[in-house]
């Protein structure tokens, strides 16, 4: 606590390459040294005991619990005074010390088992060594991770990107956006309260997904029938109202001509409803003093960018980048992040996230070992007795 | 097209089958009938899940109501597996009651038939990630029920075999939870650019994982202090509720989680 107050938080960024590699080598050599002296000192033997394991796991659980209860701020922001040290748990010295302690206990346990390994120890080694490798790689590698954001405009190669602090960096690769596309879900119709604007029923809004051009549906006590569906429409003012006509060009919006009737009162309305966009205004249908029918903007189903990536090493790669389908080039992973939401499906801007994580193979080795270990734990679970007796 | 309004048409017969299965198990010596009825109930319930999947045109795993659906499916399944393995007369009754709770919540708080699935969830990782987690939760739920039963049972200390059953349930549940956690990490790398971002859901998943890890090591260390171990199980399961849905209400997680998909 006093350390936290005296020098501020502990920042993992200080552990950039090659310091992180050096730290890992020194730390594990030290642990190995301690391992060979374990016969001499009871305290060293204690490090690979269940007591040490349980105390280190549960204290880590406790600090993580605090982290879960206190709203966390990103590391580069100034931490307020409300929760000194706890609103940035990852920079908390207590957390850092505890983590090193946990890794030490885990490391000593792994060494002990590795040096007397038998076939039946395989699940144990996979689980423990896997966790050790994954955690060490993740923590030491985090300073070497570069995570940048790049805004691209159709037809203009871009090689500048910004990091989370907002610094602009020049990259060894450029991205040229050829086309950005969105596939949208069919339009939805909903009821809103005229005064508050809340969607109805409040807290659990009902909706009618207009999938066909002649769809029929209901919303609360209203029957809704779609008469005309114009996926590409333009709004045209006529007198004191708006009507919609077909418009097959950039900036078109979705419009529906609908008939709505109340099931009990037989009150009927007919007219255009549209979600509008950056070019055309939206249009709602007022049903009575309390309720209006509206069309919210359609939700994106898929959005993707057709791009060419040029690298400094001379590669030219044409790819489609989509959410959940990043592209990997020269150690960089390129993710579809966003677009110009005010323009929606007519956006000519595509935002990418670029991530470089040189320690990823280390972490993935650990993760794959743990997956194998978890499967082994499940498959061989009957062999519970006897396996763990070696540790006193 | 099956929608949520048809839910009770499937849930009621499934529940009746599970009830019959539980009754035959309770009577003892009717193993075939107990298993047969439970299995029939599972098939009916699965039919609803598959029908909903087809009519939603996406996996029914996005909203809380949809995850409750899987949970009420996996509870009797886990109950059946435990029954087949250890022959506890009461386990099917418990899994049936627990399934009823989640069916009841779904009937009283009906979910919206919402077909949309945001791009972030459209991934081959989605289905295994959720199913593995729901199965783990059901296993750990069964372990919690066992722990409660052993703690509340008057004037009889748990037998070593009964503690073994807790251990086995936790071990299976924990290995599935680990698979869920790690598959989530691999998916996160593909979807969000990093395998671990300390998103509130991830933080609480880590807390829960550490807690069950403590339990497993504690059981290996102090083989005979049962009540502390059982209390650890209860606390772990309470924290698991936070990871599952509690964070939707937690002030510290408001507006920062990318894991909120239910309306």
Image (spheres, helix red, strand yellow):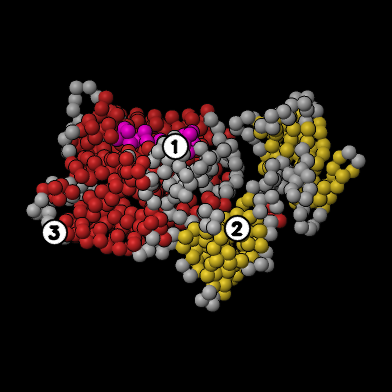
**B98 relative to B57, above or below:** above
Is mark 3 in CB contact (under 8 Å) with mark 1?
Answer: no
The residue to which callout 3 is attached is A36
Chain at tag 2: A
Residue A354, magenta (yes or no): no
Residue B246, magenta (yes or no): yes
Q: Position of residue B239 (x, y in %)?
A: 37, 36
Which SS class for mark 1?
Answer: loop
Farthest residue toward the front?
A: A6
Residue in view at x 59 percent, y 39 percent = B113
**A10 relative to B107, above or below:** below
Q: Position of residue A272 (x, y in %)?
A: 80, 41
Residue in view at x 28 percent, y 34 percent = B232
Which span is picked out in magenta? B233-253
Q: Nearer the viewer, residue A291 or A379?
A: A291
Chain at tag 3: A
**B172 relative to A28, above or below:** above
Quarter placement of the N terminus of chain A: top left
Q: Which of B92 and A65 is in front in this view?
A: A65
Residue A239: name its quadrant: top right
The residue to which callout 1 is attached is A81
Residue in view at x 14 percent, y 47 percent = A43
């Amino acid at each position: 606590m006093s350390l936290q107050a005296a020098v501020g938080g502990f920042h993992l960024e200080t552990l950039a390459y090659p310091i992180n590699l050096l730290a890992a080598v020194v730390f594990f050599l030290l642990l190995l040294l301690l391992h060979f002296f374990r016969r001499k000192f009871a305290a060293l033997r204690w490090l690979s005991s269940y007591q040490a394991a349980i105390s280190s796991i549960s204290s880590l659980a406790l600090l993580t619990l605090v982290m879960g209860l206190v709203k966390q701020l990103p590391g580069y922001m100034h931490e307020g005074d409300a929760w000194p040290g706890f609103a940035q748990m990852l920079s908390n010295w207590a957390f850092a010390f505890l983590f090193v302690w946990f890794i030490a206990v885990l490391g000593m346990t792994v060494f002990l088992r590795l040096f007397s390994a038998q076939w039946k120890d395989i699940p144990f080694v996979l689980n423990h060594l896997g966790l050790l490798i994954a955690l060490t790689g993740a923590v030491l590698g985090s300073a070497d991770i570069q995570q940048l954001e790049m805004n691209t405009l159709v037809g203009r190669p871009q090689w500048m990107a910004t990091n989370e602090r907002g610094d602009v960096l020049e990259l060894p690769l450029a991205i040229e956006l050829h086309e950005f596309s969105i596939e949208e879900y069919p339009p939805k119709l909903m009821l809103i309260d005229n005064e508050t604007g809340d969607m109805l029923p409040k807290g659990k809004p009902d909706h009618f997904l207009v999938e066909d051009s002649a769809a029929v549906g209901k919303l609360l006590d209203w029957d809704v029938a779609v008469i005309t569906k114009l996926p590409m429409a333009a709004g045209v003012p006529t007198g004191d109202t708006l009507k919609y006509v077909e418009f097959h060009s950039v900036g078109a919006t979705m419009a529906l001509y609908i008939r709505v009737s109340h099931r009990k009162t037989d009150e009927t309305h007919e007219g255009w409803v549209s979600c509008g966009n950056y070019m055309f205004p939206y249009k709602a249908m007022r049903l009575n003093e309390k309720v209006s029918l509206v069309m919210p903007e359609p939700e994106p189903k898929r959005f993707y960018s057709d791009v060419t990536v040029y690298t400094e090493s001379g590669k030219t790669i044409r790819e489609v980048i989509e959410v959940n389908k990043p592209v990997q080039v020269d150690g960089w992973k390129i993710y579809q992040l966003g677009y110009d939401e005010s323009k929606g499906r007519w956006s000519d801007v595509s935002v990418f996230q670029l991530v470089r994580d040189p320690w990823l193979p280390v972490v993935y080795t650990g993760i794959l070992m743990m997956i194998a270990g978890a499967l082994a734990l499940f498959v061989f679970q009957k062999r519970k007795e006897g396996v763990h007796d070696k540790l006193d | 097209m099956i929608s949520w309004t048809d839910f009770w048409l499937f849930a009621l017969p499934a529940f009746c089958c599970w009830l019959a299965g539980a009754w035959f198990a309770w009577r003892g010596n009717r193993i075939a009938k107990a298993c047969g009825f439970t299995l029939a109930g599972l098939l009916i319930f699965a039919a609803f899940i598959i029908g909903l999947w087809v009519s939603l045109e996406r996996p029914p795993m996005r909203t809380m109501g949809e995850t409750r659906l899987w949970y009420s499916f996996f509870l009797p399944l886990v109950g059946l597996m435990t029954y087949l393995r250890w022959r506890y007369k009461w386990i099917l009754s418990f899994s049936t009651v627990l399934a009823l709770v989640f069916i009841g919540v779904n009937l009283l708080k009906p979910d919206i038939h919402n077909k949309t699935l945001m791009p972030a969830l459209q991934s081959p990782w989605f289905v295994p990630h959720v199913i593995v987690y729901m199965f783990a939760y059901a296993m750990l739920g069964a372990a919690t029920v066992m722990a409660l039963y052993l703690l509340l049972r008057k004037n009889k200390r748990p037998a070593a075999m009964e503690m073994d059953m807790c251990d086995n349930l936790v071990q299976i549940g924990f290995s599935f939870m680990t698979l869920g956690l790690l598959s989530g990490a691999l998916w996160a790398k593909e979807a969000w650019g990093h395998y671990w971002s300390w998103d509130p859901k991830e933080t609480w998943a880590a807390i829960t994982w550490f807690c069950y890890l403590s339990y497993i090591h504690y059981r290996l260390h102090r083989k005979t202090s049962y009540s502390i171990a059982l209390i650890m199980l209860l606390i772990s399961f309470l924290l698991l509720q936070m990871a599952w849905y509690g964070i939707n209400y937690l002030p510290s997680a408001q507006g920062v989680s990318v894991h909120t998909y239910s309306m």
